[in-house]
């Protein structure tokens, strides 16, 4: 029941915020949204403290710490089946935490239709939490598609019309059509899987635990796996299918960007971990080289694209493409270290990219531009903002001691035994990321400031507080990742135990 | 064959609609009162709706009334669906016609007549009742489309529909005659038994001609040319009726024909039909993208939607009838809401309906509830989860996957992606600030409010189907047809 509340609280909070604006006032939705997200965060952290996430899986079946199930559409064996293990928990905590950040950072940015904005923001977060908790494939797809709508509105209605871009409505449409169409392909694959299972057992069900055991002919398995992969590859985003991301980021409001980079991209990696690898282990193992090369392409392409960007948000967007390339490699390498690295990398990237987008928003609020050619010399005009931005840029380039380093290091160590060449190429991405991060810092903050430059208003208490927490968390993740690793260990073991058997069959296991 | 009381009881919904027609006609002759006549018609239709729903829930067993009609769960379900659409049209017409300068009362008479045709089609199990039902459905529509008889475009639309519809009827009649020449019976079951064996080419040609006639009514590509013009010309409530009740009735009889009269045995025709579905999905969506007129856009989108629905029908198998029912149910509920909003923002006093996309610019800031309803309905048309449209699409895809119709499903995915584009275009314009601050508002009064309540109900129903579909699935299972053999 507590899991259902984790999903319902944001939805109810959103409705309250929307209607409350009319009756109470403009400030009301912000406080409601903040309270809602803090409550959700509190519940999820409480679950972390009291729950035992070290239970080992038995025979490849995951072991849920908390579970909740009621029938929903018995006609098709669909139930409202929610469950949480270590992986789900970490993702939910990340989502709710970044939800708090997203609400806080839009405190002054959003002036129009505050209530409706928070409705969309909270519904989007609620939908994402639903993705991380749903264990019924129909329910998973339901949330997967549903949370696109509020995101669409966030971009289309509160976005910026960045100069040179094609406008926020264009970006929002592109985002929606890319993700929705790929989602439909996944729906086809889900239904295909259900039909195959039905033909074997005579039971129609969408339940993960039942479908996990489905035996498929190799060809069928490959087709269905590709159906899932297309949806995940678009969301991740993987290189040929990434073009919606920079557009969406450059036009989205700050909270939307935090949401997109920090949380939405993680749903794809989560989907591969939860569904792609365990349900289709053999096809995944065969497909692994292709996926890993796509990951390398993403790392290098994203990094090179960063150099040519002048829009600071587009630069960070492309750096996300690059970082998610590491995640893709780690996922398909499938060793315990690599999978654990993926989890850490997802969290670390969520925090660091989220923070960078918040800072971009702060800069935009003050300078009214995101063009780096017009910045320069900001170091002398702010006391706090540039060093903080520098900190997160360092995190993004993988400075040891910060979370991203742990993630990337574990991924590379884990992948070495599976695919040395790919690992070497991926490691070169670390160098490139150092270069573009420094270029970002150099172009935006150093150099001479314009002649008539006035000192700018620095970060307020609210923003400093938010940044402080983010920095502490990244440091904690970098210096003592064991807490996170322990939580996700058994979930990753389950994935590994299924996947490694298939890798052995495909003849490329270490 | 004697008509016993059991037969008459089974026919209650049909008899109630007929009685309503007579009473409304007499009431108009006695005294013209817009409100009174509308109330009478709505009352009678409601009564018919309640009896049909009641009979469906009780689990009425199938009764054959004369060789022409069969009253089973399937017939009752579609009767109810058609009556719901008719009732919504009546409510909307009331809001729409309040400001109309001319005779307003006959609209309800025509509407009830046409509904009777639809109910006949839902019960038809004989080619004679099929044809009678189809004509009874269409003939009042000519007058309804051209109802604002002094304006040019409705008149043009009505005339176009009249001519093309007559051609389609001729095709169909000839097809029926060809089949009769081979089978020697007009009963669906006899025709089905004939096609189950080896059929002569003449009978297959007859089947093809029948399909042409029905495809015209469903406006499947390439028989779709009339649709955008007629939708654009017709008053908004009538366009609503055309898109929902009239198409649902035709699809209901088409499905029954397929299941009982051996449509599935004519393999070559099923193949042709899947091409029609493919073309309808792709062309309907592609052409809709270019439209700046909301009614034309909805016309093209309805072409595409019936393409999706055809996928479920072509799939065959145990799920087909249920999937078609689910698709039509969700489509009707969604369309009622969409056209409802279009009607409520229009008014016949102006020279045209509010049908250009820029009429809807910034609607959210002027009429927040209407705009919210339209947003939800457009999302449902696009098939986003949480809305009814998703359940319909889910059913269609499930049926398609079950029958391995991969290339049709591919078209469905591509078509949905294109469809998103134009639904989103309309949707986002609802929220954009209108720079010219132009007002295109019908006055708010009681008539508008009943229409508003109707669209609100449609939205609630739509969300209910989307969130908790199980009760509706139960209803669909009561309305199943069993495949012979």
Image: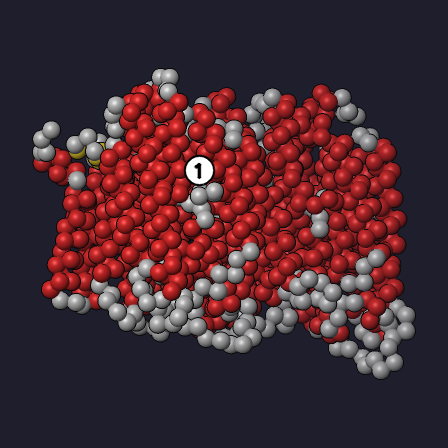
Q: Quadrant of residue A385?
A: bottom right
User: Outermost residue toward the top?
Assistant: B197
Give the residue drawn at x 57%, y 72%: A112
Q: What's the residue at 86%, 34% (across, down)?
A: A421
Q: Position of residue B370 (x, y in %)?
A: 41, 64
Q: Position of residue A328 (x, y in %)?
A: 73, 40
Q: In the depicted view, which residue is nearer to us: A344 or B460?
A: B460
Residue A501 is at least partly visible in this image: yes
Q: Is residue B476 left or right of residue B402?
A: left
Residue shown at 45%/64% (left/top)? B355
**Vertical position of residue A148 compared to residue A340: above or below:** below
Residue A498 versus residue A137 in the image, above or below: above
Location of residue A95 in the rendering, given as x and y in whole percent from the top left corner = 62, 52
Find numbered disc 1 in the image and state the secondary structure of the residue it sits on. helix
> Taking B393 as reference, is A464 above or below it?
below
Depth order, front residue of B255/B199: B199
**What is the count of numbered marks?**
1
Q: Nearer the viewer, residue A315 or B458?
A: B458
The residue where tag 1 is placed is B310
* A136 displayed left or right of B152: right
User: In which image quadrant can residue A497 be found?
Assistant: top right
Chain where mark 1 sits: B
Tell me: residue A361, above or below residue A400: below
User: How many residues crowd around disc 1 within 10 Å: few (fewer than 14), some, or many (20 or more)?
Assistant: many
Quarter assignment of residue A392: bottom right
Q: Would residue A146 be seen by someone viewing this image from the given angle?
A: no
* Quadrant of the drawing holding the C terminus of chain B: top left
Residue at 40%, 40% (x, y): give it: B215
Horizontal relation, residue A137 to residue A168: left or right: left
Quadrant position of the N terminus of chain B in the picture: top left
């Amino acid at each position: 029941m507590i899991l259902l509340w984790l999903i319902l609280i944001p939805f109810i909070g959103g409705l309250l915020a929307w209607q409350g604006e009319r009756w109470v006032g403009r400030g009301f939705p912000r406080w409601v949204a903040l309270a809602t997200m803090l409550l959700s965060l509190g519940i999820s952290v409480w679950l972390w403290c009291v729950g035992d996430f070290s239970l080992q899986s038995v025979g490849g079946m995951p072991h849920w710490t908390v579970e909740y199930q009621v029938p929903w559409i018995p006609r098709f064996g669909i139930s409202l089946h929610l469950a949480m293990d270590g992986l789900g928990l970490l993702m939910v905590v990340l989502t709710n935490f970044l939800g708090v950040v997203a609400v806080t950072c839009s405190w002054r940015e959003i002036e129009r239709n505050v209530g409706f904005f928070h409705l969309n923001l909270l519904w989007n977060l609620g939908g994402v939490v639903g993705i991380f908790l749903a264990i019924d494939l129909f329910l998973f797809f339901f949330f997967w598609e549903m949370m696109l709508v509020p995101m669409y509105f966030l971009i289309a209605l509160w976005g910026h019309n960045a100069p040179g871009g094609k406008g926020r409505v264009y970006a929002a449409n592109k985002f929606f059509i890319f993700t929705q169409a790929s989602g439909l392909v996944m729906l086809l694959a889900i239904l295909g899987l259900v039909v195959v299972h039905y033909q074997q057992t005579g039971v129609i069900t969408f339940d993960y635990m039942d479908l996990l055991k489905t035996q498929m002919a190799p060809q069928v398995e490959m087709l269905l796996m590709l159906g899932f992969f297309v949806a995940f590859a678009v969301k991740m985003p993987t290189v040929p299918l990434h073009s919606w991301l920079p557009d969406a980021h450059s036009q989205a409001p700050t909270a939307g960007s935090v949401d997109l980079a920090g949380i939405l991209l993680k749903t794809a990696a989560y989907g591969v971990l939860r569904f792609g690898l365990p349900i289709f282990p053999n096809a995944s193992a065969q497909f692994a080289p292709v996926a890993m090369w796509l990951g390398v392409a993403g790392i290098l392409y994203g990094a090179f694209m960063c150099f040519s960007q002048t829009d600071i948000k587009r630069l960070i967007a492309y750096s996300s493409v690059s970082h998610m390339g590491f995640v893709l490699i780690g996922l398909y390498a499938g060793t315990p270290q690599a999978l654990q690295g993926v989890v850490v990398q997802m969290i670390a990237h969520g925090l660091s990219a989220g923070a960078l987008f918040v800072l971009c928003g702060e800069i935009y609020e003050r300078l009214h531009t995101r063009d780096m050619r017009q910045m320069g010399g900001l170091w002398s005009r702010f006391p706090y903002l540039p060093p903080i931005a520098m900190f997160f840029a360092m995190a993004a380039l993988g400075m040891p001691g910060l979370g991203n380093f742990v993630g990337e290091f574990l991924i590379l160590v884990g992948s070495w035994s599976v695919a040395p060449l790919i690992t070497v190429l991926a490691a070169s991405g670390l160098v490139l990321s150092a270069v573009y991060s420094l270029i970002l810092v150099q172009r935006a903050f150093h150099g001479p400031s314009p002649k008539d430059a006035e000192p700018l208003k620095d970060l307020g208490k609210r923003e400093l507080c938010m940044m402080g927490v983010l920095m502490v968390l990244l440091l904690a993740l970098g210096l003592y990742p064991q807490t996170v690793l322990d939580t996700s260990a058994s979930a990753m073991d389950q994935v590994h135990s299924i996947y490694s058997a298939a890798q052995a069959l495909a003849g490329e296991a270490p | 064959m004697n008509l016993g009381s059991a037969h008459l009881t089974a026919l209650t919904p049909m008899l109630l609609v007929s009685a309503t027609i007579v009473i409304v006609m007499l009431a108009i002759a006695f005294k013209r009162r817009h409100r009174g006549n509308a109330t009478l018609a709505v009352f009678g239709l409601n009564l018919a709706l309640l009896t049909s729903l009641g009979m469906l829930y009780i689990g009425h067993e199938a009764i054959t009334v004369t060789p022409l009609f069969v009253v089973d769960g399937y017939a009752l379900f579609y009767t109810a669906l058609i009556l719901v659409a008719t009732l919504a049209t009546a409510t909307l017409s009331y809001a729409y016609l309040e400001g109309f300068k001319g005779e307003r009362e006959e609209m309800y008479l025509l509407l009830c007549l046409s509904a009777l045709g639809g109910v006949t089609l839902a019960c038809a199990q004989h080619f004679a009742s099929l044809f009678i039902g189809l004509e009874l459905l269409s003939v009042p529509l000519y007058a309804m489309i051209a109802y604002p008889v002094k304006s040019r475009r409705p008149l043009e639309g009505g005339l176009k529909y009249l001519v093309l519809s007559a051609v389609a009827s001729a095709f169909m009649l000839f097809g029926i005659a060809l089949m009769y020449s081979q089978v020697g019976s007009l009963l669906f079951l006899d025709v089905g038994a004939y096609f189950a064996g080896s059929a002569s080419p003449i009978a297959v040609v007859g089947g093809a001609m029948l399909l042409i006639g029905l495809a015209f009514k469903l406006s499947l590509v390439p028989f779709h040319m009339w649709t955008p013009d007629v939708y654009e010309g017709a008053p908004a409530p009538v366009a609503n009726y055309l898109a929902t009740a009239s198409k649902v009735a035709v699809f209901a009889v088409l499905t029954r024909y397929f299941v009982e009269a051996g449509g599935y045995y004519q393999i070559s025709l099923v193949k042709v039909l899947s091409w029609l579905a493919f073309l309808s999905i792709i062309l309907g969506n592609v052409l809709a993208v270019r439209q700046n007129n909301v009614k034309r856009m909805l016309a093209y989108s309805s072409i595409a939607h019936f393409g999706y629905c055809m996928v479920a029908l072509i799939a065959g198998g145990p799920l087909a009838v249920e999937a078609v029912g689910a698709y039509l149910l969700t489509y009707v509920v969604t369309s009622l809401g969409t056209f409802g909003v279009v009607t409520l923002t229009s008014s016949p006093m102006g020279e045209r309906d509010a049908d250009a996309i820029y009429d809807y610019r910034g609607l959210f800031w002027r009429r927040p509830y209407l705009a919210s309803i339209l947003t939800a309905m457009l999302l449902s048309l696009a098939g986003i989860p949480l809305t009814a449209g998703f359940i319909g699409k889910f059913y269609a895809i499930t049926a398609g996957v079950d029958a391995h119709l991969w290339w049709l499903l591919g078209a469905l995915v591509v078509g949905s992606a294109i469809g998103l584009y134009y639904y989103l275009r309309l949707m986002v314009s609802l929220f954009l600030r209108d720079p010219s601050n132009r007002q295109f508002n019908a006055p708010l009064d009681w008539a508008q409010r009943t229409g508003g309540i109707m669209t609100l109900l449609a939205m609630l129903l739509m969300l209910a189907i989307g969130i908790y579909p199980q009760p509706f699935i139960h209803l669909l299972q009561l309305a199943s047809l069993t495949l012979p053999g």
